[in-house]
Structures are given as C-alpha cells and as structure tokens.
Amino acid sequence: MKKTWLLLVAVLLAPLILTAKTTTIYHTSDVHGFFYPQHGQGGYAALEAVIKSGPASYMLLDSGDFSNGTVETRNSKGLKGVQMMNRMNYDAATIGNHEFDFKGEGLAPLLANAQFAVLAANFFEAATGKYPPSVLPYKVFDENGVKVAVIGLANREPTNPSKLYTYGKPLVALEKALTEVEAKNPNIVIVLVHDSLQDEKHGTKSYVQDIGRKFGGRVHVVLGGHAHQIFQNQYIGGTLFVESGCNLQNVSRVTVETDDKTGKVVSAKSQLIPLVVAQTGEDEAVKEYADSLREPGVDEVLGEAAETLSRTPQQADRQDAPLNDWIADLIRSYAGTQIAVHNNGGTRVDMVKGPVTKRDLIEIHPFDNTVTLVTVDGKFLKKFIKKSFAPDSLYSYSGLTITYKKNKKGKIKDLKIFVDGQPVQNRRKYTLATNTYIAGGGSEGWMFKRISDKDKKAVGSKTIRDLMEDALRQGKVSAPETGRIRQR
C-alpha cells in the first residue's frame, strides 16, 4: 500500500516538475585581474571548463572590481581585464570601487571597450546628470525563453574620487529601475551590486540586506561583492543573496526555477564551485588567450620566503597578521618614525613559502603607493585606533601595541595603546608613517583628512613594493612575531 501511495504521489507531481524551467547564472566578483591559477586554483581557463561542463544556455555576470589587482590589469589600466571578460562572453557587470584606480578619466576607456552590458542604476555624469555612455541602469535578457532583468548598483566609494561622476542613493535608484523593469514583465529579477551583506566599516552596516527587506518578492536574486566574502543560499525576505569571494578562486552557479505556465519564480538556489584545476581542468583556447595577455619580465625571482606569511590573523586572540606586520615594519624602518600604519585592505594575497617574484609582489600589493610621514597627537591616535575596529582592526601597526576586551555583544572595549611600551599621551606629538593613499584620507583613512598638510611630508620615492623587493634581495624573509593587537 505504501509503495502504491508513493507511486501515485510521483505520478501527480510529475506534471508539476515537467512544467518548471531552469535558468543557470554563473557569478564572479572582485576578480582583480587574476587570469591565471594561484597554487593550483582559479583562473579563467578553469572557469570556462566549468561552464562548458554545464548547461548550453547560461548567463555570466560579474559584480565589479575587474580592472586592477595584477600586473596585467595595472599596466594596461584595466583594459586587459575588460578584454578577458569580452573573451569569456560576460553578459553584464557593475562598477566597483577599483574601476577608479586609474582615476575618473580612466573609466571611460573601460566602458567603451566592454562588449558586455555595464549596469549601474545609481551612477551618473556630473555634468549632465545622465548615465555615462555605455552605462545602463538595467538590461532585460531573453535566456532560453525566460525574461531575466538585471539591475546594476555601483559602489559609491571609488578608490580615487572623481568630479566627473556622481552617485544616487542605491535603494532609491533600485526602486526607480525596478518600476521600469516591471513594466516589461520579466520572469526573474537580479540585482548585481558591488557591495556586501556584511561589509561593515566604522560601525555602518551595509544597505544590501535592505534589498531583501524592502523588495522581497520583487527582486529574486542579489549578487554581491566588494568585501571578498562567500555567501551561498542566504535568504532575506525570500530573496536569494550570493557572494563568490575574490581573485577568481571560485564561481557561484545560481539556478532559478520558473513555472512554464505562469512564468513565476518557483525557487532559487546557489552552489559555490571551487576552481581547483586538478578537478575542473582548463579550457585550452581560453588558457592560450589568457597567456597571450601575460606581461613580460615580471616572473623574475627576487628572493625567498622562508615560510608562508599570511595576510590574515593566525591566532584567535590576535588581530594582527604576519604579512601585514612585516609590511608595517618596512614602512616604519624606511621612514624612521615612531609608528607605522598599514591598511590591511591593501594586502591582497599571502606571501607563500618559496621563491617570490615581482608578479607575486604586485599581487600582494598592486597599488603604487609611496610613503608619507604624518605628525599626530595622542588624542588623534587614540580616536583613530578606536574607529579602526569594525569590529576587526582595519590596520596593522609597527611601533605600537594594542590590548582590548570584548563585551557580551562582541564589541571592542577598554582599549589600551602603547608606543614603545609607554601609554599614549593625549597632548604628546608622535611621528607616524603610512602610505600616500591612507595619508590622503582614502577609504578607511578618512580621519587623515583632518590633519593639516603642513603636518604631512613625503618620504622618498620608493613604493611599498619597492620596500618589499629590497627586503627580499637582502635574504630570506621570515614572519615577524604577532601579538601587536591582542585581546586580554
């Protein structure tokens, strides 16, 4: 009787299953020019192999930060990043903060050369108030008979702020675009955004979660990025949220089921696929094209790392990491200051044990920042350090140590700060070195905008990478002892 009942249920459900249509979307974000595998994982050739092993009909979308991070993208001012995406036949991408690494004037060539839709509903020309050439607020695709609307939302904090462009409030822009899109009766609505579910800085929570709370039922999938996080099958207000990490180490495959009769979304789910070359293989044609974009002369070995220097903390009670501490020490030694400050976000990948090349250094720190000496008082220093916890420290330091406690909610309290073993004094002046980007008030260094220019001075002409290269040429590099930011 039980078998008969199960068979009857299966027969009854069969028509329902047959009437569902599957739409497949592949998602990447924060590729940062990593065209090739790193230590056996990642790269476009592996991505192409995964795509070819799946359905013949699919969409390929990217959430931004495709134009800088490696020597290929840096030396081409982002154009090779766009060329690679063109070769991969991306359908659409939005604009990340690092699309401005080559300043406002550097964005237009990227947009002009993109053969994929660049979507940013909240991004405008300052002079006209209109969308820039080659930028659309949204696009509706016909994917195997399913109408898929993709709306873009650009990141509003470019690495190099430009007077050429302005930004609208993302949720207001989304509301306007969504109203227009719904008039076209799409089956699926996707929001492509260069912001993250959990990108919290200075105590400000991301607005991305509000997309689900405010537009749940109208927006079916949100594909995010920026914070280099991985999220799969996260639902808010019935909306699926997905983030795919960074540096093309993984790809997310999103499948959306729509009812054939009504056209409405039945379900949406995601799967993270690690691009481990031994498992995925590599597409030879894409590999050949990617190799044709390689920059010459950057695979010279500069020195050796005696051990892997991680860019992330290795002990639960410490917030500083070996690689970041090492860089901070180099900055402080070069500048001859009491303190050095290094923004952790400037360190993109680990320094792996073994030979280290120029390419490795560019991938570790792709920015051409030099060093600036800043004179600050103890009061500024205390406030700066306190604000830098969000709740993990945004910075690493040389010359000072920090201890802290956490309250029951996990927030930082009872900070104690020491310079050369002595408690920081409010009125005392301290010399501090950091990179030019932070000293100029960029991104998380916003407090440095309050420091007078007379209290800032350029230190030589060497970049942070030059300092790393010099150190490697002097002998094997080992990880410094951590514990400069320690929980009591």
Image (cartoon, grey):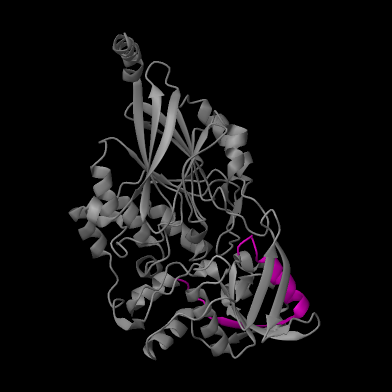
Judge whether residue 126 can be spotted in this image: no
Name of the residue lying farthest toward the front: 1
Please tell me whether residue 251 is drawn above or below residue 342 in the rendered image: above
Residue 465 is inside the magenta segment: no
Please tell me whether residue 484 is drawn above or below residue 239 in the rendered image: below
Name of the residue lying farthest toward the right: 427
Residues 108 and 474: in front is 474
Q: In the shown orientation, is residue 339 left or right of residue 189? A: right
Quadrant for residue 328, please give it: bottom right
Residues 157 and 362: in front is 362
Residue 374 is inside the magenta segment: yes
Q: In the shown orientation, is residue 458 left or right of residue 233? A: right
Percent across and percent down for residue 471 are 43, 87
Percent across and percent down for residue 62 are 42, 48
Percent across and percent down for residue 14 are 31, 15
Quadrant for residue 256, please give it: top left
Name of the residue lying farthest toward the left: 284
Q: Quadrant of the N terminus?
A: top left
Q: Quadrant of the C terminus?
A: bottom right
Residue visible at 42% across and 88% down?
470
Q: In the shown orientation, is residue 412 left or right of residue 308? A: right
Residues 423 and 301: in front is 423
Percent across and percent down for residue 179 are 57, 30
Question: What segment is highlighted magenta in the picture?
Answer: 366-392
